[in-house]
Image (cartoon, rainbow, N blue to C red):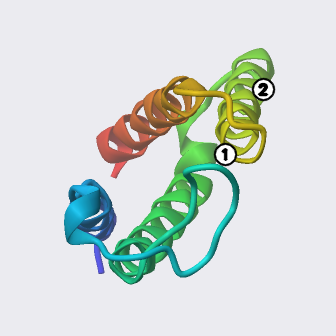
Amino acid sequence: MPVRRQTVVALLLVLCGIGILALPARLEGPEVIHFGPGHGPSLVDLAGVALVTPGGLWLLWIIYRGLSSARLPSGALFGLGAGFGLGLGLTVASVFADFAWWWTIGLTIVTLIEIFLIAGVWRRA
């Protein structure tokens, strides 16, 4: 399957999963797993995660395979990796240490880096 088509399918999986995860809590039902105060997925959330996970991993694989063609300098790659790690760290810390709304900053950082890299792979496909 061509890279652009793979990217579109993976993005659709992620967007559908995010749509399910964004449903109001009153529609979701009780928590199945409890991570911390106010954090834990319901069955509906787990359905969203079941779509986001393969779609997100597929996008990461597409980025990984196309990264060599992006021809980014090593300093830029280090900065992107450090930013990605910071974003993931903020997200995980916000769930387990109850840092209210820090997850939005973390996921925004991760999303912006992924959009930048996906756009680079898309241009060279």
Crowd rating for badge 1 (residues with CA inside 10 Å; few <14, some 14–19, many 20+) = some
The vertical placement of 79 against 28, above or below, is: above
Q: Quickly name the residue at label 2.
A: 82
Label number found at residue 111: none
Q: Residue at x 22, y 55 (%)?
A: 24
- Where does the image place residue 94, in percent across and percent down from the top left? 67, 36
* Mark 2 residue type: Ala
* Count of number-bearing discs: 2
- Where does the image place residue 74, in percent across and percent down from the top left? 79, 23
The vertical placement of 32 against 107, above or below, is: below
The vertical placement of 75 against 15, above or below, is: above
Q: Residue at x 69, y 36 (%)?
A: 98
> Which mark's residue is nearer the viewer, 1 or 2?
1
* Mark 1 residue type: Val
- Where does the image place residue 4, in percent across and percent down from the top left? 26, 60
Q: Give the spatial CA distance, label 1 vs label 2.
A: 20 Å
Q: Quickly name the residue at label 1.
A: 95
User: In what element is the residue under mark 2?
Assistant: helix
Does residue 89 appear left or right of residue 12 in this picture? right
User: In what element is the residue under mark 1?
Assistant: helix
Does residue 93 appear left or right of residue 12 in this picture? right
Determine the image quadrant of residue 16: bottom left
Determine the image quadrant of residue 42: bottom left
Q: Do we see residue 8 in this rendering?
A: no
Q: Decide which of 20, 34 is in the foreground and name it.
A: 34
Q: Residue at x 56, y 64 (%)?
A: 40
Mark closest to the chain's N terminus, 1 or 2: 2
